[in-house]
Image (cartoon, rainbow, N blue to C red):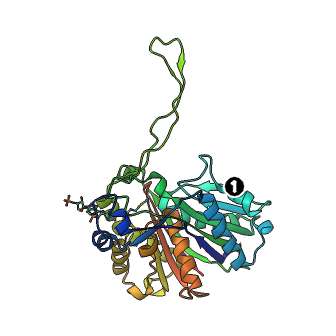
Amino acid sequence: RGSKLIGCGSAVPKLLISNDDLAKIVETSDDWISVRTGIRNRRILSGGETLTGLAIEASKKALEMAQVEADDVDLVLMCTSTPDDLFGSGPQVQRDLGCKNALAFDITAACSGFVLGLVTATRFIKGGGFQNILVIGADALSRYVDWTDRGSCILFGDAAGALLVQAGDGDEDGLLGFDLHSDGYGQKHLNATVKDNGTPRPSSNGSVLVPPTLSSYSCIHMNGKEVFRFAVRCVPQVIEAALQEAGLTGSCIDWLLLHQANQRIIDAVAARLEIPSDRVISNLANYGNTSAASIPLALDEAVRSGKVQKGHVVATAGFGAGLTWGSAIVRW
Ligand code: ACO
């Protein structure tokens, strides 16, 4: 069975942090940030807002556009690396949306999470038994940013986006082709690792167990130059592989929609694939890098503004920590 993409939605926090705001806490400037990255503003969770709350708001909009009732959702895939609960946020999103007949779980793959979730949803539909699947990309990397590191704190923002994937009629398929990769050797370039394993250990004389200390994660550590090189090298390759699987060429793409990490990466990939800038979707200036949320957030804005229309072919690609990267060529 094929899949159809029939609804999308997004949500961002209220608090806007501009480049000038950041220049008050680290040595940087609006000019440096916007020239090197294309980012001007980002939104950050505050005042009791939660990631789960953003995911619910985005999902409600996607359900409304799709005209699907919460009861009719069979699966909620919460793609996030920064859940509100260590054990995952998917089931809480399911509960608060009222998707009482759905299975819900989290998928963790950083900025590639949404592409992996989208492909996973279509595989569940193909396998049978699943009719309506909500794929949510949501992240709050602001929780793990080192706000004294000007090389990384300027990049990230918080957001959520959602997509309703429905079983298609006959062979109709909204997922035309895909290609997915990971490379754990590259983890050294981008990570936020656990600080303490928290396990009990024997005391020095070996007689009693010392209680575990609470674990937490370190701030995001990133070698920006390496991540930049990785993205510019691997993203065009993965899109070409997905296009080949779909039996398409670059000229069939109506819209190029990459994970929104850096405008220079977007421009370099578009140039490599010979896609003109008027067919490239970018909202990075307003939100920064929102990790797993960036693709569904940009898709939602492009659909609601009338850019992406029914039947358009959208080449998506996610890339980031893991390292992970992948492309899904979809028909809206
Ligand atoms: N303001 C002013 N100066 C700065 C800033 C800043 N915010 N940040 C770094 N600099 C300085 C550096 O200290 C350095 O100074 P020096 O020459 O005196 O040593 C100079 O600017 C150049 O620094 P670089 O790090 O070489 O700058 P670069 O051009 O590589 O840009 C950036 C840095 C924007 C981070 C870029 O490397 C990048 O975007 N990389 C990709 C990041 C990315 O896409 N991540 C996506 C995955 S995220 C995820 O998966 C969770």
* 297 vs 184: above or below: below
Q: Vertically, is 215 above or below 78?
A: above
Residue 56 locus on image (x, y percent): 66, 64
The N terminus appears in which quarter of the rendering?
A: bottom right
Seen at 53% across and 87% down, the residue is 307
Q: On the rendering, which quadrant does ligand 1 occupy? A: bottom left
Q: Foreground residue, 111 or 122?
A: 111
Compared with 150, 171 (above or below) is: below
Q: Which residue is mark 1?
A: 92
Q: Residues within 10 Å of mark 1 (few under 14, many from 20)?
A: some
Towards the viewer: 223 or 287: 287
Give the residue type that dot 1 points to. Answer: Gln
Residue 132 horizontal/vertical position (percent): 73, 69
Q: Quadrant of residue 17?
A: bottom left
User: Within the image, what quadrant is residue 31 found in?
Assistant: bottom left
Q: Residue at horizontal 32%, vertical 59%?
A: 224
Secondary structure found at label 1: helix
Q: Is residue 120 visible?
A: no
Task: Please name whichever residue, 268 or 15, is drawn nearer the observer in this view of the structure.
Answer: 15
Residue 110 is at least partly visible in this image: yes
Give the quarter of the figure containing the C terminus: bottom right
In the shown orientation, is residue 90 left or right of residue 183? right
Horizontal and vertical percent position of residue 225: 29, 61
